[in-house]
Image (cartoon, helix red, strand yellow):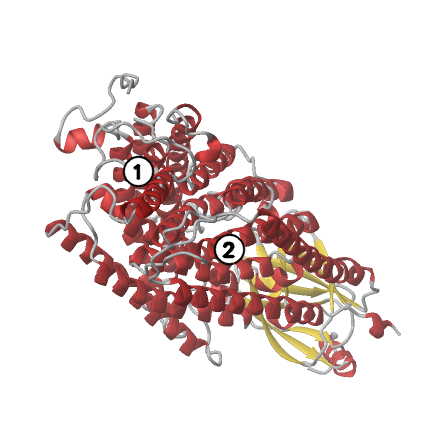
Amino acid sequence: MISFALISTRREYWSLFGVYVPIAAAVFAVVMVLVVGTVLRYRRRDRPARWSENSPLEASYAVVLLLISIFLMYLTFSHEHRVDTVANREHPSLTVDVTAARWEWEFSYPRYGIVQRSGAVGSAPLVVPVNEAIRFNLTSIDVIHALWIPELEYKHDAIPGSVQSQVLTFTRTGTFSGQCAVFCGLRHPEMVFVARVVTPAAFAAWLRSKRPGGAA
Amino acid sequence: MARPAPPAGQGSRSAGWIGGLTSTDHKRIGLNLAVCSLVFFLIAGVLALVMRAQLSQPDNHIVSDQAYTELFTMHGSTMIYLFVTPMAIALAMYLVPLQIGALSIAGGRAALAGFWTWLLGGLVMQSGWLTAAGPGRDGWFSYVPLSETPYTPGTGQNLWVLGVILAVAGMFIMAGCVLATIARHRAPGMALLRMPPFTWTALVTVLMVVGSFPVLIVAMILLYLDRTTAAHIYSGFNGIIDYQDLFWFFGHPVVYVMFFPYLGCAAEAIATSAHKRWFGYKAFVASMMAFSGLSMSVWAHHMFITGGSFNEFFAFTSTLLIVPAGIEYFDMFGTLIGGALVLRSSMLFGLTFFVQFLIGGVSGIFTASPVLDYAANDTYFVIAHFHYTLFAGSIFGFFAGVYHWFPKISGVLLRERLGKLQWALMVVGTNMTFFPMFIVGGEGMPRRISRYPQHPGWGTLNLIESIGSAIIAAGVLVFIYNLWVSLRTPEPAGSDPWQGHSLEWWTTSPPPALNFEAPLPPITSYAPLQDLREQAEDEAREQEPATA
């Protein structure tokens, strides 16, 4: 029931991409064809025309442009509402506190007492279950970093002096790369991590393995 | 014709180097600013080539990580503070008084002081290379707290901050002089709605400079205090967001400062080479006003992922830019259709400006959508986007302007064949360099990394980008050779080689100290010389039946 309503940032991104990019490509193609066409048609003539204005036509064109931008805004606002507002109303099945520092990531699972560190200091992955809403609480202890997992088509800043929450959902299992997106100094390229997305059963097994006294 | 006496100190007082560097003649100041900017362009270009060499292979080790941070910081800072923006002001400084029939710039001494302040800023910024810790290394927007002393100690970053303050202050002063010239020194008959398209683009540009540059000066002074005293101004979450708001309140308008005058160059080059006046003048002026107004209200679209901006508002204003931008394209087609086109270098660069800028424009609408920006922000997608606006766009507009006005400024023609060769090299090089960046960015290659891992396709695409950058460099070398050969073996241009539309083509090439020796023609529209031509044509046609 809950999984039905889950918002996937990846799905939202590609659905919007599927509208924006074809429109952009079509606009570019039309302009390109018109430029080549007018250049071929009107080069090396003797008598240029003298007209230089057609206000009614131009005004109607401006209205068309306005309608296009309103259409794009409507799409963007509805998608953004889902990503930024609806997703955060979901009841997360897991909370991960993410603390960024130069040049490492600390993923802490407060309910389970687990801490994973990646980046310049190690490579313990972020492990999360698939198709479940996960709340990430983002902060930084020094400069601005950004948590970025390209698979999610989403990133958000980790800013010192604040804790910002975002509920995110992975829609497929696998091992995905993640990294800091905001330049944070010399070893910024090394501030990477791996996100391992597993089935809920495998996640439960992983939690058991991390419990003190559990299987190594 | 009665003319007001030139202000004291106006015109060339002494010849030679000293005279050239202390002249208050707007043409001399504009030319000095343009030449210095071009030198900074070459420096920034070399820095870019080193970066492209480093990135040509995965896990490459041509330069150290530390050197790479200096390279991208100084490449961006040099291009923005020391080339594209000052060159926009140099064009306005040189051309606006000529286009509006003014004898001189308003506040010539202030303009000269502005030029020297800017140049001092540039030298201070670059002097960081000589310090032990190296020059600025936090990127051209140097976000806090990274740019605070605990994270970036050293004199180089202080010099970077001081350099930005001086350079921006100098440009602010010069823009103020251009604005005052437009307000006070227009020739009789030159109503605001008779100013040529380039002058209109320059007017909205200097208005944006005057409105937004002081904010950066303040932001940088506060950063300097933070770095050198225990001021703690940009502290905590709010302090960090405040810096970004202040920076981008300058940083977005400056993007349009780096665009409008080059749009004006492309427009004038196209209209002149089409032998038809620029189409839709009133709509063009209105769209310029709307463009500049909107551009002052879009800044936080750089901050969608911070959680500290009102994303819907800034997405809305940014997307609305479709309307004024679309008008410019309509006007370009309106000018071309029915024209008598000559595909000379200025025309080719002008048309390419519009075509390539469009890629930057539509990718800008893409990143104006927060959901799409959450993926694209801080990746090579953004690098591709703004290089398509600034390099594939503005730089091509700049060269349209160079090929259009060089004969006026120097009195000699540039070589057409070399111009077309340069154009071809730059079109190929630009698209090879910047288009693959959309792909690697979409696949998750972050900006500002000196090394990237083995990833399917990235090595090849980055190598293509690096080869493209070398082709751009070849194009720039052809341009420099063209300048050299054209000045060394001059082909005199005459006062009006292209059948120009506006008043600068009325005077000699190069123009005399006080711009115009002959009385100005009647100024009846934004293309007074085209009016004269059409009038003469009509008279000739009327007399035809009589003589036949």
Instruction: Say which residue appears at 40% left-offset and 56% top-offset.
Output: B339
- Looking at the image, is B326 positioned above or below residue B91? below
Q: How crowded is mark 1: few (under 14 residues within 10 Å), some or many (20 or more)?
A: many
Residue B149 locus on image (x, y percent)? 46, 43
Residue B463 locus on image (x, y percent)? 37, 74
Q: Split into 4 quadrants, where in the image is the N terminus of chain A?
A: bottom right
Q: Split into 4 quadrants, where in the image is the C terminus of chain A?
A: bottom right
- Of marks 2 and 1, which one's residue comes earlier in the chain? 2
- Looking at the image, is B547 positioned above or below residue B513? below
Callout 2: helix, strand or loop? helix
Near-viewer residue (B90 or B215): B90
Amino acid type at image mark 2: Tyr
Number of the label disc, if any, that sits on residue B164? none
Q: Residues within 10 Å of mark 2 (few under 14, many from 20)?
A: some
Amino acid type at image mark 1: Glu
Question: Which chain is disc 2 placed on?
Answer: B
Instruction: Say which residue appears at 49% left-offset and 43% top-offset.
Output: B281
Residue B304 locus on image (x, y percent)? 63, 53
What residue is pinned by disc 2? B329
Question: Which chain is disc 1 placed on?
Answer: B
Q: Is residue B168 left or right of residue A114?
A: left
- Real-space Cα distance between discs 2 and 1? 25 Å
What residue is pinned by disc 1? B504
- Looking at the image, is B204 positioned above or below residue B298? above
Near-viewer residue (B66 or A133): A133
The reply to whether residue B70 is visible in this rendering is: no
Callout 1: helix, strand or loop? helix
What is the total number of numbered labels drawn onto the structure image? 2
Residue B413 locus on image (x, y percent)? 20, 51
For the residues tagged 2 and 1, is the chain the same?
A: yes
